């Protein structure tokens, strides 16, 4: 694994295409249930997160659902939502490009560095509640908000991955009775029970679960077995575990994690309550957000086991090139030793019967997944100097580790 900026990425493999839809692919960011996600660069030098659908999932129904996802994502906007850039559901393979947020996700940050201070959790809560309020005004629910879907970027936190919301709306198999889609640790009881239609209260609950994790490193309910976890979530007699929550945040988190949807607060009122907590600390909301951003972006990539030396590669100048002023050397890239990938919080599709039968769908796990090169002749990628440096470094790392 290689660290670029504050993201943990993997070098491209020989099976990976060099370019998708005009975006030059530089590295692998992660792998989700629907496909592989790459770090790409546009012809003009803008970085993007390029999601490519798994070849094994590409059929007429998947293309239709993917096209529906694209059409909805075009309408989702806001300062705290990763922006849609471009897509082609008819390509081989289908792909989608969104804004690349240079930062670790909340789950990785808390796992690596521990929980956030209460006032910064209040800042995170106010920011995300306001972002979700704007999404709800656009007629959408997120449905799968979790720590891994909150990116801590240099301009503040942003929400990603609205695909589940779109698929849940567009696919008969996901809107059928007694079908559950989401992440159990952050799933509202009515969502876990398969209630349809869902309301904005499911995102309020999920946000409460995300903030509890940011504050304590734990979820409202935890269990080694997913069926036991579903039972805890849906049992009205089992209260969420709020151990360690400070007094100033306990009332708001308790109300957000209420078992009954009707007892949860609206997201605009959540913003007001978190704002009051911030001001009680003698801070303005903008000051608290700056402190949150400074804390979460000042730390190195969440990879505490890395002890590998720094590898620095300088560009080679062809013979006969006129002398020019040398550019500054690229930032060091740290190559950690091989090790187990961090476990993501998985999303699940569950058909509820007497005992829920749960099928796990891998969600955003780093790891290899071959993606075939387009059958058509690839266009020559446009490479900036920095892109060439980064790509060369990644290829060197891959070559050094390859067994052939």
Image (tube, rainbow, N blue to C red):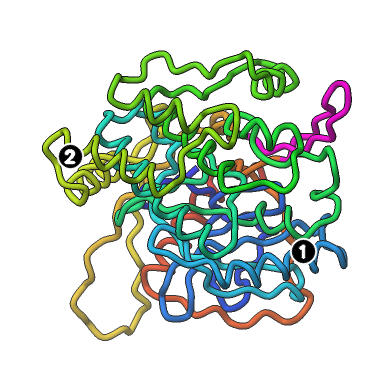
Residue 3, position as x, y percentages in the image: 41, 46
Which element is circle 1 on? Answer: helix
Name the disc covering residue 31, or none.
none
Residue 148, position as x, y percentages in the image: 51, 41
Which residue corresponds to mark 1?
65
Magenta includes 354?
yes
> Which is the main secondary structure of the residues drawn in magenta?
strand
Q: Residues within 10 Å of mark 1 (few under 14, many from 20)?
A: some
C-alpha gap between disc 1 and disc 2: 44 Å
Q: 349 or 251: which is nearer to us?
A: 251
Which residue corresponds to mark 2?
279
> Counting residues from the N terminus, which is met first, the one under dot 1 or under dot 2?
1
Query: Looking at the rendering, which quadrant does residue 314 occupy?
Result: bottom left
Which element is circle 2 on? Answer: helix
For image coordinates 51% across by 29% down, the residue present is 257
Where are the magenta residues, as a range? 346-361
Q: Nearer the viewer, mark 1 or mark 2?
A: 2
For image coordinates 72% across by 48% down, the residue present is 197
């Amino acid at each position: 694994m290689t660290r670029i900026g504050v993201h943990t990425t993997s070098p491209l493999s020989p099976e990976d295409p060099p370019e998708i839809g005009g975006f030059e692919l530089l590295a692998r960011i992660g792998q989700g249930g629907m496909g592989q996600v790459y770090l790409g660069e546009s012809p003009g030098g803008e970085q993007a997160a390029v999601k490519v659908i798994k070849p094994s999932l590409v059929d007429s129904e998947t293309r239709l659902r993917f096209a529906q996802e694209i059409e909805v994502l075009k309408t989702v906007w806001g300062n705290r939502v990763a922006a849609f850039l471009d897509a082609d559901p008819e390509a081989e393979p289908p792909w989608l490009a969104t804004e690349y947020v240079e930062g670790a996700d909340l789950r990785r940050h808390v796992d690596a560095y521990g929980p956030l201070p209460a006032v910064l959790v209040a800042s995170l809560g106010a920011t995300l509640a306001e972002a979700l309020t704007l999404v709800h005004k656009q007629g959408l629910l997120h449905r799968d908000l979790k720590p891994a879907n909150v990116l801590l970027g240099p301009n503040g936190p942003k929400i990603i991955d609205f695909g589940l919301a779109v698929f849940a709306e567009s696919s008969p198999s996901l809107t059928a009775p007694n079908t559950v889609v989401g992440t159990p640790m952050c799933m509202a009881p009515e969502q876990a029970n398969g209630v349809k239609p869902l309301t904005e209260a499911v995102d309020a609950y999920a946000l409460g679960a995300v903030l509890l994790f940011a504050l304590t490193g734990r979820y409202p309910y935890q269990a080694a077995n997913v069926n036991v976890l579903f039972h805890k979530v849906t049992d009205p007699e089992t209260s969420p575990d709020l151990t360690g929550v400070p007094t100033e945040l306990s009332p708001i988190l308790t109300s957000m994690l209420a078992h009954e949807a009707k007892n949860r607060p609206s997201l605009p009122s959540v913003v007001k309550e978190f704002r009051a907590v911030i001001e009680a600390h003698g801070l303005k909301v903008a000051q608290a957000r700056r402190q949150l951003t400074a804390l979460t972006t000042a730390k190195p990539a969440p990879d505490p086991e890395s002890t590998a030396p720094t590898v620095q590669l300088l560009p080679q100048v062809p013979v006969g090139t006129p002398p020019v002023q040398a550019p500054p050397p690229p930032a060091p890239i740290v190559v950690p030793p091989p090790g187990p990938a961090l476990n993501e919080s998985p999303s699940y599709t569950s058909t509820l019967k007497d005992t829920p039968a749960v099928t796990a769908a891998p969600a955003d796990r780093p790891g290899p997944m071959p993606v075939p090169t387009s059958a058509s002749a690839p266009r020559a990628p446009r490479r900036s100097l920095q892109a060439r440096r980064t790509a060369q470094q990644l290829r060197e790392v891959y070559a050094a580790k390859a067994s052939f």
